[in-house]
Image (tube, rainbow, N blue to C red):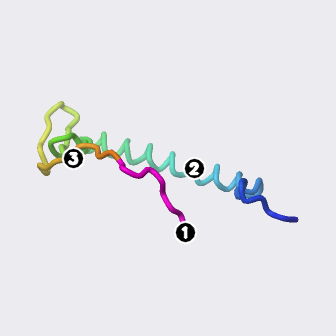
Amino acid sequence: MPVSKKNTLSTEDQPYLEEIQHRIDESAKEISRINEALGIGLVTVKEDGIYREFNNGASILIKAGDFRRKKLVNSRIKVR
């Protein structure tokens, strides 16, 4: 049976992909719980640098720099 180039994802792969997504979601939730328990806070990227924001509201500048979003001149991406 010829494979359509438009739909390369077969229906047989769908349950496996859903299981992978479920496990990634569980891992992300566990990392978030550990992060909150340790009080480490979150890392955020702003235009003027990278900051660590703690649970108590304090923030520390980790790396200063220019982190503004850049616009793509050519939005076409070649996949080989």
- Say which mark, if any, is on residue 67: 3
* Residue 64 highlighted magenta (yes or no): no
Find numbered disc 2 in the image and state the secondary structure of the residue it sits on: helix
Question: For this view, does 48 lie left or right of residue 73?
Answer: left
Q: Residue at x 63, y 52 (%)?
A: 19
* Dot 2 amino acid type: Gln
How crowded is the residue under tag 2: few (<14 C-alpha within 10 Å), some, or many (20+)?
A: few
Real-space Cα separation, disc 2 to disc 3, in angstroms: 30 Å
Whether the residues at callouts 1 and 2 have beta carbons within 8 Å, the answer is: no
Distance of mark 1 from mark 2, alpha carbons? 25 Å
Tell me the kind of residue under disc 1. Arg
Q: How many numbered badges does the structure rendering display?
A: 3
Quadrant housing the N terminus: bottom right
Q: Could you give the CA–CA distance between mark 1 and mark 3, rounded to whole angstroms?
A: 29 Å
Q: Which residue is drawn at the image coordinates 16% and 45% (left, top)?
A: 49
Q: Name the residue carrying label 1.
A: 80
Between marks 2 and 3 in the image, the one whose residue lies nearer the viewer: 3
Q: Nearer the viewer, mark 1 or mark 2?
A: 1
**Could you tell me residue 80's position as x and y percent?**
55, 69
Answer with left or right where residue 26 lies relative to residue 56: right
The amino acid type of the residue labelled 3 equals Phe
Is residue 21 or residue 41 the one in the foreground? Answer: 21
Q: Which mark is first along the chain, 2 or 1?
A: 2
Q: Residues within 10 Å of mark 1 (few under 14, many from 20)?
A: few
Of marks 1 and 3, the one in the foreground: 1
- Where does the magenta region start and end? 72-80
Residue behind mark 2: 21
Say which element carries label 1: loop
Q: Establish if 15 lies above or below 1.
A: above
